[in-house]
Image (cartoon, helix red, strand yellow):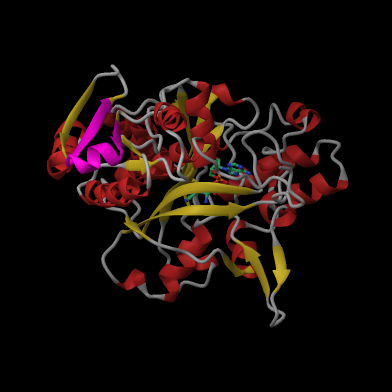
């Protein structure tokens, strides 16, 4: 049946059977964060527009082209969250979490919204699992955040990805680099908009995907050649921790992230089986963000956002078997109303003991109901008719080998639990 309504362009639906893999990926990525002490934070789906404009950066594509911004009924400008870091920082400041023990370690998951051009792996509503560790600047913590992401992907069963890392410097070396980069960029024949970008935030120009800009900036100076001693040591320490943790990485000095708040350690996980949208997750340190958002004390932070949608696509691309389906272990086949009444009770008892069971509802004939049982992928079928009811018995059919046995109705729950529980 075709519908009058369609989901808005670029907004995915998560349908069975793939939806169970989506949930499993989200849960495994979150589990990796829990194992390292990150607590859940649930954030609003929309916030003050100014929070993102200031936090993410006016010169980014995310803010200048991709935000879902609208006036609410009170004429306040609000924006559907395009990412999670700015909202976490806002919540930390608003609730004074920064006065407690540091680092504050938080994780979140849910939908984010970016008005991008839709294609495979690029949606206007995208799902992320993210973590933020706020208030401690320690290379071991940088390595932990990266290792948690790596562990999350591994827990999902993903193997064929690469981790790229770099350092984007800090106040001790960024200004000199910025100047050198601007000098280089001003020497190029740039269109007015790109030139304006070079003036506001020259690093953004290195993130330009247009081939002609990529070619023109191929020899641009790199941050990695301008590092101060302290940043160089910091980056070496992060790499040392990653080596000891056994997390493989490659240093990519040309790595530029799409958001403005990054400083020092910055990273991206890339999967080569995904075509153009190959970034399955990324993050980094953002030491200036808190003061940018009005925090009185300057607290550093580091975190990541992992793309749940792209991780699911990457698992499919690697042909990792999906063991997450919501199939029931048992399928009830009632022949008649009295049998249905009894099977409904048996199903309730089985579920309360943790055994999943579905029932052939709708008064189906035996043949059709058994076909449904086979199709359901269940391990056992419980077949109950008037004759069995009268004799206080029920038939258990093993759907894998076709064998059948009859057991007492009073003991069927224990019997099934022992078989498949
Ligand atoms: P991001 O790199 O913009 O970082 O997004 C993180 C991940 O979300 C990407 O690597 C990608 O897998 C996924 N993603 C982004 N846009 C889309 C899209 N349109 N469709 C599908 N998936 C997408 C952040 O958002 C930062 N807040 C991460 C962070 C946290 N940095 C520090 N803390």
Residue drawn at x 72%, y 31% as measured from the top left: 217
State whether residue 296 is above or below residue 210.
below
**Which residue is nearer to you in this view: 324 or 84?**
324
Q: Which residues are magenta?
A: 381-397
User: In which quadrant of the rendered view does residue 358 lie?
Assistant: top left
Q: Position of residue 10 (x, y in %)?
A: 69, 45
Magenta-drawn stretch contains 396: yes
User: In which quadrant of the rendered view does residue 101 lie?
Assistant: bottom left
Magenta-drawn stretch contains 185: no
Question: Can residue 274 be seen in this snapshot?
Answer: yes
Residue drawn at x 52%, y 72% as measured from the top left: 294
Where the C terminus falls, by quadrant? top left
Residue drawn at x 47%, y 71% as measured from the top left: 295
Question: Can residue 167 be seen in this snapshot?
Answer: no
Q: Position of residue 216 (x, y in %)?
A: 77, 29
Q: Position of residue 298 (x, y in %)?
A: 43, 66
Ligand 1 placement by image quarter: top right
């Amino acid at each position: 049946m075709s519908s009058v309504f369609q989901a808005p362009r670029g907004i995915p639906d998560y349908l069975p059977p793939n939806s169970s893999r989506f949930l499993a990926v989200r849960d495994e990525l979150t589990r990796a964060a829990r194992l390292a002490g990150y607590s859940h934070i649930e954030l609003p789906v929309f916030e003050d527009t100014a929070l993102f404009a200031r936090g993410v950066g006016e010169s980014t594509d995310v803010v200048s082209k991709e935000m879902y911004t609208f006036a609410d009924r009170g004429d306040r400008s609000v924006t559907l969250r395009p990412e999670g870091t700015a909202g976490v920082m806002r919540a930390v400041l608003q609730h004074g979490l920064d006065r407690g023990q540091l680092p504050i370690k938080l994780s979140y998951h849910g939908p984010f919204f970016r008005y991008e051009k839709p294609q495979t792996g690029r949606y206007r509503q995208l799902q992320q699992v993210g973590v933020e560790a706020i208030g401690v600047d320690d290379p071991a913590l940088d390595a932990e955040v990266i290792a948690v992401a790596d562990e999350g992907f591994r827990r999902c069963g993903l193997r064929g990805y690469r981790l790229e890392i770099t350092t984007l410097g800090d106040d001790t070396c960024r200004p000199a680099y910025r100047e050198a980069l601007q000098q280089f960029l001003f020497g190029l024949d740039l269109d007015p908009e790109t030139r304006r970008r070079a003036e506001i935030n020259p690093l953004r120009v290195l993130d330009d995907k247009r081939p002609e800009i990529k070619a023109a900036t191929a020899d641009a100076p790199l941050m990695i050649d301008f590092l101060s001693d302290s940043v160089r040591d910091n980056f070496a320490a992060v790499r040392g921790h990653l080596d000891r943790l056994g997390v493989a990485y490659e240093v990519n000095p040309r790595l530029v992230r799409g958001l403005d708040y990054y400083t020092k350690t910055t990273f991206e996980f890339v999967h080569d089986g995904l075509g153009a949208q190959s970034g399955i997750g990324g993050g980094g340190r953002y030491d200036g963000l808190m003061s940018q958002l009005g925090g009185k004390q300057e607290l550093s932070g580091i975190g990541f956002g992992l793309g749940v949608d792209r991780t699911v696509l990457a698992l499919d691309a690697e042909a990792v078997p999906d063991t997450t389906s919501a199939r029931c272990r048992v399928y009830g086949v009632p022949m008649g109303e009295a049998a249905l009444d009894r099977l409904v009770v048996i199903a309730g008892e089985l579920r309360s003991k943790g055994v999943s069971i579905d029932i052939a509802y709708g008064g189906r004939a035996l043949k059709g109901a058994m076909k449904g049982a086979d199709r359901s992928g269940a391990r056992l079928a419980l077949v109950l008719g008037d004759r069995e009811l009268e004799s206080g018995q029920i038939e258990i059919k093993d759907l894998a080998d076709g064998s059948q046995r009859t057991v007492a109705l009073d003991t069927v729950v224990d019997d099934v639990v022992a078989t498949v529980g």
